[in-house]
Image: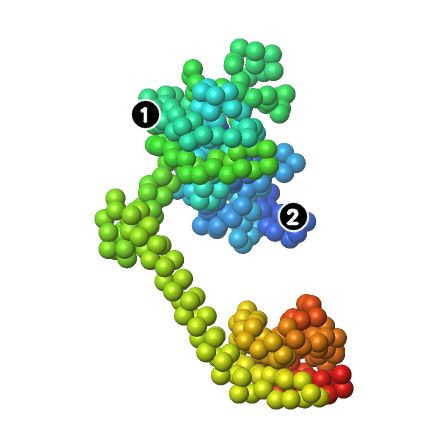
Amino acid sequence: MEKLFYQDPYIQTFTTTIIKQAQDESGKWYVTLEQTAFYPEGGGQPYDIGTLNDNKVIEVQEINGEIRHYLEHPLPEITQDVKGNIDWERRYDHMQQHAGQHLLSAAFEELFSYKTKSFHLGKEVSTIDLDINELTEQEVLEAETLVNRIILENRKIETKWVTKEELSDYPLRKELSVSENIRLVIIPEFDYNGCGGTHPHSTSGVASLSILSLEKQKNMIRVSFVAGNRVLKQLHEKQQVVSELSSLLNAPQNGMAEAVTRMLGQSKEQAKELKEMKEKLLEYEATALFSKTEVISGRTILKSVFQNREMAELQSIARKLVSASDDINVFLVAENAGKLQFVGARGSKSNLDMKSIVKEVFAFINGKGGGKENFVQGGGETTVTGEELIGEISRIISNV
């Protein structure tokens, strides 16, 4: 098969003859062609998509030496010649990202001798993994600056097929994984690298490159970047966010950090005030609950049922009650979204063993939890109502 994408990566349309149309093991239809400009997935670069006679090409793979063009629907059996159209926006984006990766990897190696271990060309963002443990912001800036200088110099990006014996003539950036059909991608006096992907004819075709973020990945540093048209896309998206935030904060762009800092300070102060107010409300609620105390088997008991209350609130109310009365025994139940939650607490002068009581409570509601002799908490199923559970607690206490 003649690979037109190697003859000229800028070929967008072509006409050729079908060699065969068939289904693979999973039943997907594909065709092989005498020549193709569709790039098959490989070397870190995604496959091309497009059309053959207006029939969508949805995937391209090189399998067992043949390039398979997977189709949305099979072509009519009488079809012999087809016209291919590459999705050029997608292809050129891949060319820009791939060439950008060559430049970025070469820059890190040229400046700091940091080697690239892997490359991923993503749909929105691409990454390289550097074989290092740390990378400074200054090093990132220097590498990005060098890449964009090489882009502006409009250096040629050359491709060359060489033999294994000829490799010694080139200062390769990394060891090759093949020993035949060797294709080099060369940016003179900057990068010499074995690669089977597609690239612009010159570095200016990359347009620009921007490093977005760093992430520690095991024993490496993952560098996320965008090149070409993706840089503008990122800029527009970020500018839109900045504009929206500027409007929300009622502050100019250079005053946004100060506005956010001020807002966070206010938010913390408001959160503190809210917490204090909530504690006061819980104190008032605890005081009001004292009217519910009763005597069971000679012990002062306080029981109450709540709706949709957080466990932390039940615990706080219980602690306030036993702090205010040293002989009280408190049992609070909350009915919360399909489950029952329970808190039991005793005053310092009570000898009621909450742990033994809670075992029977949990058996009654198929629950689980834990605590100490003076304070327990947990939850269980709503097999009974909160009031029925309170009644069961009264029965348990009567038998203690």
Which residue is identified by label 1?
A: 152
Q: Position of residue 270 (x, y in %)?
A: 36, 62
Q: Is residue 13 visible?
A: no
Q: The residue tagged with tag 1: helix, strand or loop?
A: helix
Viewer-closest of 267 and 328? 328
Choose the circle earlier in sequence order: 2 or 1: 2
**Res 216 → quadrant:** top right
| Residue 24 circle label | 2
Task: Determine which quarter of the picture holds residue 329.
Answer: bottom right
**Above or below 168: residue 59:** below
The answer to whether one can see residue 114 in this image is yes
> Tag 1: Cα neighbours inside 10 Å, few (<14), some, or many (≥20)?
some
In this view, 8 is above or below 371? above
Residue drawn at (59%, 21%) of the image: 175
- Which residue is found at the position 63% from the left and 84% from the top? 301
| Mark 2 vs mark 1, CA separation in Å | 46 Å
Q: Is 295 displayed left or right of 2 in the figure?
A: right
User: Given the image, on which type of amino acid does mark 2 rest?
Assistant: Asp
User: Residue 189 placed where, x, y %?
Assistant: 43, 15
Specify the amino acid type for callout 1: Leu
Q: Nearer the viewer, mark 2 or mark 1?
A: 1
Q: Position of residue 100 (x, y in %)?
A: 43, 31
Residue 181 in the figure: left or right of residue 276: right
Residue at image point 31% right, 47% down: 257
Q: Residues within 10 Å of mark 2 (few under 14, many from 20)?
A: few
Q: Report the label total.
A: 2
Query: SS for tag 2?
Result: loop
